[in-house]
Amino acid sequence: MKTALITGVSGQDGAYLARLLLSKG
């Protein structure tokens, strides 16, 4: 699910969401 959301976004937004999700666990 998380991976799908990350790949669904492009550029810096994807990286930001990735860190945000990882931060929340």
Image: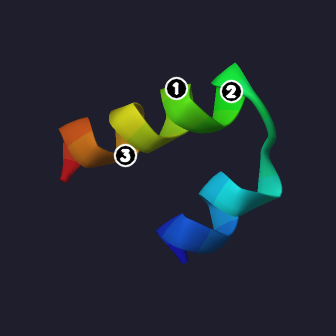
Number of disc labels: 3
**17 versus 6 height, above or below:** above
- Mark 3 / mark 2, whichever is N-terminal: 2
Question: Which one is nearer the viewer's eye here, 24 or 6?
Answer: 6
Q: CA distance from mark 1 to mark 3?
A: 9 Å
Mark 3 — residue? Answer: 21
**Which amino acid, by three-letter code, is at mark 3?**
Leu
Rendered residue at 62%/54% (across/down): 6
Identify the secondary structure beneath mark 1. helix
Circles 2 and 1: CB distance less than 8 Å?
yes
Disc 2 secondary structure class: helix
Q: Is residue 18 above or below residue 1?
A: above
- Precedes in sequence: disc 1 or disc 3: 1
Query: Among all residues in the image, which is located at the extreme bottom?
Result: 1
Residue 16 badge: 1
Q: CA distance from mark 3 to mark 2?
A: 12 Å
Classify 11 as above or below 22: above
At label 1, the amino acid type is Tyr
Crowd class of label 3 (few under 14; some 14 to 19; many from 20; radius 10 Å): some
Could you tell me residue 22's position as x and y percent? Answer: 27, 46
Q: Nearer the viewer, residue 24 or 16?
A: 16
Foreground mark, 1 or 3, reads 1
Q: Which residue is mark 2?
A: 13
